[in-house]
Amino acid sequence: MPHAPQIRIPATYMRGGTSKGVFFKLTDLPEAAQVPGEARDRLLLRVIGSPDPYGKHTDGMGGATSSTSKTVILSKSARPDHDVDYLFGQVSINEPFVDWSGNCGNLSAAVGAFAISNGLVDPARIPENGVCAVRVWQQNIGKTILNRVPITEGRVQETGDFELDGVTFPAAEVPVEFVNPIDEGEAVFPTGHVIDRLEVPGIGTFEATMINAGIPTVFLRAEDLGYDGTELQAAINDDPGALERFEVIRAHGAVRMGLIEDLAEAASRQHTPKVAICAGPKGYTASSGKAISADEIDLNVRALSMGKLHHAMMGTAAVAIASAAAIPGTLVSRTAGGAVRDTVIFGHPSGTLKVGATTTEQAGAWHIEKVVMSRSARVLMEGWVCVPEDAL
């Protein structure tokens, strides 16, 4: 019996921040996958190598972690004052679905570079030398992101001296600005409170800050769950009972935030919300062996993504951290000492990260004007990705 041949699709494998993923131009995808739907999801699942009951992604481009099972689709923007439309798909590792419910803040840093190199930005906007501010429309969440991409002799500058904890080698710095991550009239705190009591039957009742900035995030105190906030991945990811408890907490948080109506829906919405635990500044040894001292950070934060503790920090969760730290009374602000601040430095499993947020309060409602952080990005490989034709 004859078998379907493989098809070749132009693609670029890129690192952005502490994540990496497969990038496509929308017009390069097979026609059936150029629109949302089953064909697109089946294609991206096959590209990554999911679902994989072995949890390895041996037969695909994924890396069997939430940081490396990612896909991006880019196109010229039809929106005024934007250069590129950016759609992010988080591919489940062992389940047959792609989660389109949120953004990847880390890969956001690579969008501008890809857009420039692939003709999605008007050449008139690209300097011979300097910085090109690429205006990105994030389609998943309907928000604007600015990538300030360094340019040398008309080309994207990828190499440099900027070091990012969680990334092995230095590269060029790319400041990323998340503009108005919450729309006017949209609630920063979906429950209406900076702190709530989140009741999780069978596990406990916790003080929590549930914020919708960057990505919906549920913040808890590390000590309330038996942690000190300096944990590395193995301390949580090697404990199936802990992972199960975090998932139950996440599901109840999703209901309280209005993201789902029924707990059962959480299983098909793994990307959002995130769950993060925070603790005061305390020294520890990062996963790289680097010593982090208490006096160089304002607090420690550990966050879970797609059911596992992240090896560093998701960029979108960093937006939530910066926003919560800038608003008095939140669990994050209290943990960081309670002072009003527009920047915060937090410790994560791979090291530290500095993020800044500009917030205002009007008539008792909070508004987040922008969040800024520095990342880096570079092309790892470019050419074609191959998948069996019947994947569609």
Image (cartoon, rainbow, N blue to C red):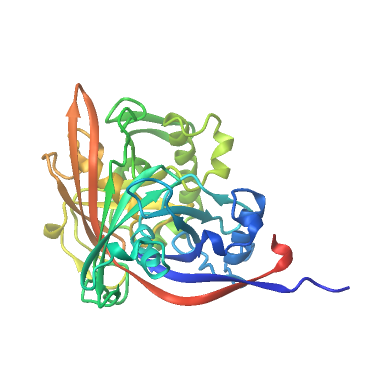
* Residue 192 % position (x, y): 32, 25
| Location of residue 51 with respect to 249 vertically, above or below | below
User: Residue 268, located in which quarter of the rendered image?
Assistant: top right
What residue occupies the far top of the structure in this picture?
Answer: 363
User: Residue 17, located in which quarter of the rendered image?
Assistant: bottom left
Closer-to-camera residue (59/384): 384
* Residue 155 % position (x, y): 31, 75
Closer-to-camera residue (53/51): 51
The answer to whether 152 appears left or right of 191 in the picture is left
Point out the image quarter for the C terminus.
Answer: bottom right
User: Residue 293, located in which quarter of the rendered image?
Assistant: bottom left
The answer to whether 284 appears left or right of 14 in the picture is left
What residue occupies the far front of the structure in this picture?
Answer: 124
The residue at 49%/38% (across/down) is: 251
What residue occupies the far right of the structure in this picture?
Answer: 1
The residue at 40%/42% (across/down) is: 142
Q: Does residue 51 appear in this view?
A: no
| Location of residue 367 with respect to 96 vertically, above or below | above
